[in-house]
Amino acid sequence: MNSAIVQRIADAILYEGYILYPYRPSSMKNRQRWNFGGLCPRSYSESERGNERWSSQTECLVMGTGATTIGIQLRFLHLIARQAAEFVPNGDESDYDYRNFRAVETIKIEDRLFQTWQEALERQFHTPLSTLDCLAHKPERISLHFPATESMELLRDAGGRVVGAFMRTQRELHGAIEVSTERLDDALFRIHVQVLNLTGMADTGPVKRDQAMMSSLVSSHLILTVEGGEFVSLLDPPAQYRDAAAQCQNVGGYPVLVGEAGATDTMFFSPVILYDYPKIAPESPQSLFDGTEIDEILALRILTLTDEEKKEMRETDERTRAILECIEAHPEQLANLHGAIRSIGPAGENE
């Protein structure tokens, strides 16, 4: 497996749509985020009549033997609610108890703007390696759990006086991965993987989507690897395996081969449509969180933002700040983004 290639693809999918141009929370298109690969609590999914998924299903084919081993890596974003709060002391001005802060949308301290926002923490979960024969005789169910967290970041003015805070909360997550295999012939197995969000939600009436996302596996995807076997492309399977490939049922994503062209040891279950062996153009200097746009156009648009717009972008979070700093610091990269030809070979090569 070419881990560097796989990692870049997986990271691009993990943050696809994290925030869109013009990269500011005040922009209308950033009012509803987390649109790919979300697995929300079952109760919320059912209240939305299945419009939001609570589980995903992956099925793919492996050529191998009973001793072939498979490993599964689940990756997703665990959201963090970052709430801006004003310090309103009730008596002792050195008492930074939560009760002395009042939630607000924004706080302005001198020339800086601190905004309420949803941040995200990367999560990874690996299942134990198992053989195809073991999984055929005894399917596995592996539980996963990530605890709730809570923290406070005090915000001070130039004189060091506390005037506000960021309150960060992260909800507990529970889930499970179910894995089984089925032998289709002497050398072909079908892999079946389900990811379930088993997080409970308090029954307190209707839940808004933003709140449900806090208890969700956001941008979830899987990386499946085999040793002693080969994955079969579902997009272009060998003739003898076309019927078996057509019978694979995938819900909430698309399995594609990843790595160097021709590699067959890694399958990527993506929440967005990809082709086998996807790649990220080497000219792309920075992830812009929008694979549907052209990097050159986005870079040019960023450079034309007003100072106030850039200020809001810079202060949204560290990821939007990194985009702005990269584009502003290296404007010469625009020349590299202005088209590249890779499909034309030497004269006579295709004759």
Image (cartoon, grey):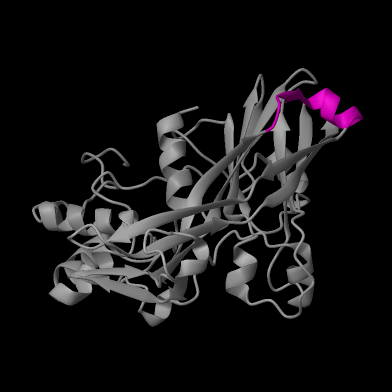
**View extreme (right): residue:** 137
Q: In the image shown, does 254 or 196 lie closer to the viewer?
A: 196
Q: In the image shown, does 175 or 207 lie closer to the viewer?
A: 207
Tell me which residue sits at (21%, 41%) in the image: 347
Determine if residue 42 is in view. Answer: yes
Q: How many marks?
A: 0
Q: Which residues are magenta?
A: 127-138
Where 103 falls versus 196 (above or below)? below
Residue 18, image quadrant: bottom left
Q: Position of residue 113 (x, y in %)?
A: 27, 70
In the displayed structure, does residue 264 sit left or right of residue 68? Answer: left
Determine if residue 305 is in view. Answer: no
**View extreme (left): residue:** 332
Q: Position of residue 193 (x, y in %)?
A: 75, 43
Residue 136, image quadrant: top right
Residue 204, image quadrant: bottom right
Q: Is residue 223 magenta?
A: no
Where 234 falls versus 309 (above or below)? above
Tell me which residue sits at (55%, 44%) in the image: 123
Q: Position of residue 221 (x, y in %)?
A: 59, 48
In the displayed structure, does residue 350 sit left or right of residue 206? Answer: left
Q: Quadrant of the C terminus?
A: top left
Q: Is residue 135 magenta?
A: yes
Q: In the image shown, does 15 or 108 lie closer to the viewer?
A: 108
Tell me which residue sits at (33%, 53%) in the image: 287
Q: Position of residue 341 (x, y in %)?
A: 23, 50
In the displayed structure, does residue 299 sit left or right of residue 205? Answer: left
